[in-house]
């Protein structure tokens, strides 16, 4: 069994894999991770290995707790990758983006894949049909856009994401919802179109905390998979076994 830890900027995800499939997964708040890791390891004594990917503020204590129970691989730019990484600054590439690229590569090794992760940020990551990771884009996420409008103005309220009726907002609230939600959807659809014009037979994956909310609002029909990143980390853990 493998224990997977994905520490994003919003939340930390724990998952247990057995024989390539997920048998347990959970979102945990930062302050509870060390305790939760111990509970999961106690509950699944079959856990032998673990991989940790952090782009957030994961307490080093979590790694120390984990090391008591199993072998730990801390994902880094020095980890072995199954694809060619052509990012110009591999040492600064987000570890979550490496995991997404790994998942894209394993799921579609001979095809073109674009992964869109709608989390704290929205990231776009491209793996081509030669198994080469090219990079992509980093854009503000859904909550971040609502918060930015509130925090950088005197008058705009902080709103929660909601379905809006028309792109012409006729009030402050509907104007904000249109700007944020309609803006993100047009951005994602537009970016997908750009990639489709350059790459034939492109597979597009949408994942991350806001994937479900956004997928039904996008023009492009794409596959939303919430476990995509965790599966990428599990592949990388197996790939980095000694
Ligand atoms: N339980 C939830 N209910 C509603 N929205 C959620 C929930 N959990 C996460 N989200 C949404 O997902 C986003 C974070 O996605 P996530 O993939 O967890 O981000 P990160 O990888 O940056 O930690 C938040 O901005 C929020 O909009
Ligand atoms: C872009 C990110 C902040 C996204 O983080 P997330 O929204 O998944 O929490 C993260 O992948 C990161 O810190 N990247 C480093 C810069 C780069 O990828 O080039």
Image (tube, rainbow, N blue to C red):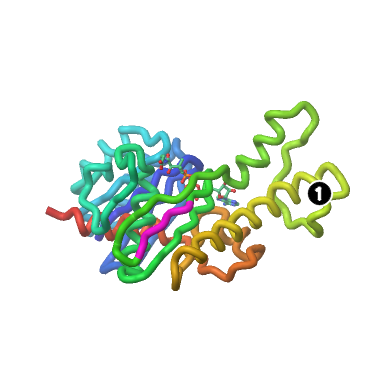
Ligand 1 within 8 Å, label 1 CB: no
Badge 1 marks a residue whose secondary structure is helix
Against 92, residue 136 (above or below) is: below
Point 41% across, 34% down: residue = 57
Q: Position of residue 151 (x, y in %)?
A: 68, 30
Q: Which residue is mark 1?
A: 174
Quadrant for the N terminus, please: bottom left
Residue 200 is covered by the magenta coloring: no
- Residue 41: x percent and y percent? 29, 51
Q: Is residue 106 left or right of residue 123?
A: left
**Above or below: residue 143 compared with residue 184:** above
Q: Main secondary structure of the magenta part?
A: strand
**Residue at 32% over, 53% down:** 4
Tell me what residue is drawn at x 58 percent, y 61 percent.
Answer: 212
Residue 31 lies, in percent from the top left, at 45, 36
Q: Nearer the viewer, residue 67 or 167?
A: 167
Q: Spot the residue most to the right.
A: 170
* Depth check, front residue: 73 or 165: 165
Whole-percent x and y of residue 9?
A: 47, 40
Instruction: Give the total of numbered labels.
Output: 1
Residue under the point 56% across and 63% down? 193
In the depicted structure, whether residue 9 falls above or below residue 187: above
Instruction: Decide if residue 149 is on the left or right side of residue 36.
Output: right
Residue at far bottom of view: 201
Magenta segment:
124-128
């Amino acid at each position: 069994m493998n224990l997977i830890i994905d520490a994003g900027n919003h939340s930390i995800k724990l998952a247990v894999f057995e024989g390539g499939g997920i048998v347990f997964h959970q979102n945990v708040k930062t302050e509870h991770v060390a305790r939760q890791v111990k509970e999961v390891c106690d509950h699944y004594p079959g856990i032998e290995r673990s991989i940790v990917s952090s782009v957030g503020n994961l307490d080093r204590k979590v790694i120390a707790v984990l090391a008591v129970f199993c072998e730990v691989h801390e994902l880094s730019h020095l980890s072995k990758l199954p694809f060619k990484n052509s990012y110009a600054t591999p040492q600064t590439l987000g570890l979550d983006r490496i995991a997404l690229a790994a998942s894209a590569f394993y799921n579609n090794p001979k095809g073109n894949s674009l992964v869109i992760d709608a989390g704290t940020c929205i990231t776009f990551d491209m793996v081509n049909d030669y198994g080469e990771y090219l990079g992509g884009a980093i854009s503000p996420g859904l909550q971040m856009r609502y918060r930015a409008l509130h925090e950088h103005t005197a008058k705009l309220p902080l709103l929660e994401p909601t379905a809006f009726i028309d792109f012409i907002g006729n009030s402050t609230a509907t104007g904000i919802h249109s700007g944020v939600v309609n803006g993100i959807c047009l951005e994602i659809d537009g970016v997908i179109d750009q990639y489709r014009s350059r790459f034939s037979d492109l597979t597009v994956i949408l994942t991350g905390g806001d994937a479900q909310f956004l997928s039904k609002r996008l023009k492009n029909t794409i596959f939303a998979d919430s476990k995509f990143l965790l599966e990428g980390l599990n592949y990388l853990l197996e790939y980095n076994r000694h």
